[in-house]
Amino acid sequence: MITSIDRVTSTDTRLSSQITDEVEFLSTTLSLLRDSEEISNDEFLEAGTIQGGLNLLSAMITNGARADELEVQISSLKQRASSICEKHPKLDEKIESKR
């Protein structure tokens, strides 16, 4: 998840379409991982908060939010993702293995 956030926020140009693509990837991948029992329901639900946060970020960009507002959302997402990754150390790796 931290990798997903970094992929769409590491450049100066943030495109809503790139973030939407990442949200779709997370949605599909998390469902596959949960259905195959590679991740727990708790991991699925916690990762879903990142997916939702990225959705919000995409909407903010589409609606012309100021750069400082975007940075607050990105910072919050990164903190949340780091916390989830600490709690579930293999989760990011499992997600990225499906790329």
Image: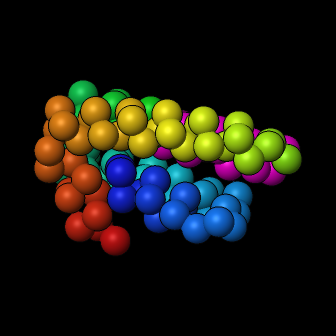
Corner quadrant of residue 93: bottom left
Any magenta on residue 61?
yes
x and y, in percent, of residue 57 in the image = 64, 44
Q: Quadrant of the C terminus?
A: bottom left
Residue 63 relative to residue 2: left or right: right
Prevalent SS, magenta region: helix
Give the vertical position of 14 relative to 26 (above or below): below
Picture residue at 50% right of the left edge, 39% below the top? 75
Picture residue at 55% right of the left edge, 43% below the top? 74
State which region is magenta: 51-63
Residue 68 in view of the camera: yes
Picture residue at 44% right of the left edge, 33% below the top? 49
Corner quadrant of residue 15: bottom right
Picture residue at 85% right of the left edge, 47% below the top? 64
x and y, in percent, of residue 14 in the image = 67, 62
Looking at the picture, the colour scheme in use is rainbow
Any magenta on residue 23?
no
